[in-house]
Image (cartoon, rainbow, N blue to C red):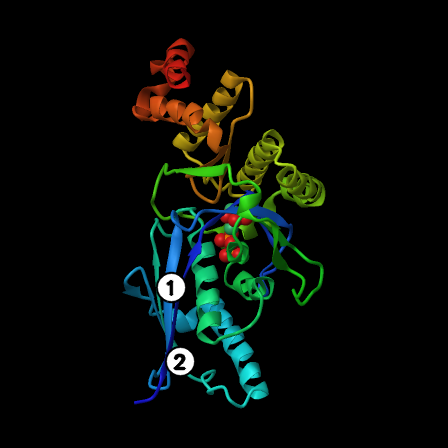
Amino acid sequence: MSSTYTASITAPVNIATLKYWGKRDTSLNLPTNSSISVTLDQADLKTTTSAMASADFTKDRLWLNGEEDLQLSQSKRLTQVLSSLKEKRRLREAKDESLEKISSWFVHIVSVNNFPTAAGLASSAAGFAALVVCIAKLFELDDDMTELSKIARQGSGSACRSLFGGFVAWEMGSLADGSDSKAVEVCPLNHWPEMKACVLVACADKKDVSSTSGMQLTVKTSDLFQKRIDEVVPERFEQMKKSIHDKNFALFAELTMKDSNSFHATCLDSYPPIFYMNDTSKKIVKLVHLINAFYNETIVAYTFDAGPNAVLYYLEQNELKLMSFIYAMFKDLNGWETKYSTEELNKFISNYDS
Ligand code: DP6
């Protein structure tokens, strides 16, 4: 029996605080702006991927959440990612005679998400990051994460940021071949371990406009978009990195919320308009501003990707202050606006604070 190679890894979801929205090159997946994200804890939202290479396999195959993806060979992104990794292995084999020639073998891949797929919870980010790191391990490649991020980027742009933990930037780069469009670490998680994220699932259904087609429509039709990429994002990118380095939560939160709003504004400004946020999302936005006003301090930030679900960022020491509000509001979703007065919430929160 011939030998087989196996590898297994998990990759976490990352949630952008400065959004990637727009491609300047669709085949290399090069963005129109740089972006920043926070990679969530592996224990929470993650993709687990296992792969096996064998001389006996007759084609590449992929199983996603228990079901085989029969369109694998038609998926340009998947085949591009796989062939880039096989090519890297082939180059290693050419240099090192002792390596078995497995670059020409087929692989079988099994990938499982522990959260809703394609519901605006960055499933493609964790999925492609897991795939790239898993196959790189299978092929015993010695490339660093920044190098591998360029391959993950071709699978799904946001995936390149999931190769690092903590606070991560995807530098858009300026070269036409994409060789400088890569993910880099801004700060590791232990730089700001008090930072926490909470996901409020407003709807776990699959989104109806994919990020890929949504952003293309925005690039083509939105007037606001050009201002966003020329003026707004470049400055915000520097400010946000500084707020992370300085651990300035109020500034980080303000930039995060403004960027989420700016991104959704360009979606609304697309023609026909794209709506990712629903009524529950809007309630969450109002609630967050209410909470920050209530405490007279910015203790929480919201951000929404291409879907209605909210991710809230806050510091651990403010968890009870925040959660008491969330609980009070959402234990009865339909009536929260009228049901709880500020006085009642005040009383509720003071119980927690005492
Ligand atoms: C709103 O990375 O899913 O989540 O590169 O076409 O696969 P493709 O798009 P994708 O878009 C993510 C968009 C976003 C913002 C972000 O994560 O930065």
Q: Which residue is mark 1?
A: 49
Relative placement, left or right, of 97 versus 25 is left
How far is mark 1 from mark 2, CA to CA? 16 Å
Residue at 51%, 23% in the rendered image: 289
Quarter of the image with the N terminus in it: bottom left
Report whether residue 300 is seen: yes
| Residue 327 drawn above or below residue 252 | above
Identify the amino acid type marked 1.
Answer: Thr
**Which residue is drawn at the image coordinates 67% and 40% (left, top)?**
242
Between 141 and 294, the one nearer to me in the picture = 141
- Disc 1 to disc 2: CB gap under 8 Å: no
Q: Residues within 10 Å of mark 2 (few under 14, many from 20)?
A: some
Q: Quadrant of the C terminus?
A: top left
The residue lying at 57 percent from left, 36 percent from top is: 256
Disc 2 residue type (three-letter): Phe
Percent from the top left, x then y, of residue 191? 58, 43
Percent from the top left, x then y, of residue 259? Answer: 59, 38
- 258 or 126, which lies in front? 126
Q: Measured from the top left, where is residue 230 in percent x and y? A: 71, 45
Q: Which residue is mark 2?
A: 106
